[in-house]
Image (cartoon, rainbow, N blue to C red):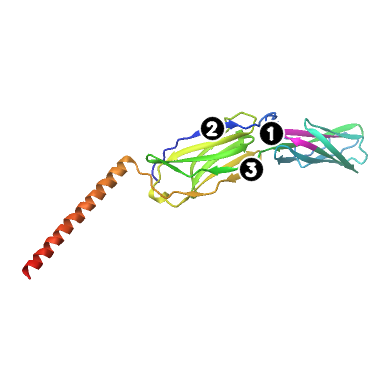
Amino acid sequence: MGPLFPISLLVLLTAASPGGGSARRRRAARAPGPGGSSPAPSGTSAPFWVRISPAFVAVPPGSSVWLNCSSSCPLPDGSSLRTGLRRGQTLGGPGWVSYQLLDVRAWSSDVLCLVTCAGETRGATARINAYKPRSVILEPPVLVGSEYTLRCHVTHVFPVGFLVVTLRRGGQVIYSESLERYKGLDLANVTLTHAFRARPHDLWQPVTCHARLDLDGLVVRSSSAPITLTVLALSPASKAVASTSIAALVGIFLVMGVAYLRKSLAMQSRS
């Protein structure tokens, strides 16, 4: 493949979204264990375990989540939930309690379930991440001089710092950029602009734009509709060579035509 000429410009336009900036932090330490407490230390009179399910969940901002807290304690003294999220309904039964959390908007929230059994309190932690579904739109390519300019729009992204935008031609990556440097906590629209020079083998291949959110284990992907390149973008030097070649070819045809015409006239004069 010929040389590429990457020109990347990322424009982030903050979109108005109530509560969109309520994220507390980026990557928090992972909860100890898969939603469960560690074994009881030796010497305890009532060893028991505590579990919370699901231990990890990712939802669109504004969603509600149910978490189930259970334990092996036959007669618990009590249970509670520690969280900064807004609480809803609570349902319970033998050995379990389910809690509803409302209007989840923070990018990452840890929720701690506590159960007390025979005077000992144990806990289990779950993590709730919020992400924003988005659309990916690739504009038709624009021929500027000797290069094609591709412009991809990724709308209403959250959290922006976990976004990677990639341009592909066929199965090959043309350009990719990560937005890890973006520290904002609001919804945003992202535009990626990239310029490159197409070669003959690029014609009629699908060009697509891909967006990926990597949310600590959950990967959310979206892609644009494909577009195709139908005209080659030629450099000034290539255009000059093409023009010279065409002029030379036309000259050859003219010489051949004149020679053929003279030969035909000569044959007619002899007959």
Instruction: Please indicate whether residue 203 sits to the left or right of residue 62 in the image.
Output: left
Disc 2 to disc 3: CB gap under 8 Å: no
Which residue bears the numbered disc 3? Answer: 219
User: Which residue is more in the foreground, 256 or 169?
Assistant: 256
Q: CA distance from mark 3 to mark 1?
A: 15 Å
When the figure is inspected, residue 263 is found, relative to residue 142, above or below; the finding is below
Q: Secondary structure at mark 3?
A: strand
Q: CA distance from mark 1 to mark 2?
A: 22 Å
Q: Amino acid at mark 1?
A: Trp
Q: Residue at x 11, y 64 (%)?
A: 265
> In terms of sequence position, does the residue under pointer 2 or pointer 3 come before the other?
2
Mark 1 crowd level (few <14, some 14–19, many ≥20, 10 Å Cα): many
Q: Position of residue 48 (x, y in %)?
A: 86, 39
Q: Nearer the viewer, mark 3 or mark 1?
A: 1
Q: Position of residue 186 (x, y in %)?
A: 64, 31
In this orientation, does residue 52 appear?
no
Instruction: Please indicate whether residue 258 sits to the left or right of residue 171 in the image.
Output: left
Q: Amino acid at mark 2?
A: Val
Q: Main secondary structure of the magenta part?
A: strand
Q: Secondary structure at mark 1?
A: loop
Segment colored magenta: 101-114
Q: Residue at x 63, y 43 (%)?
A: 220
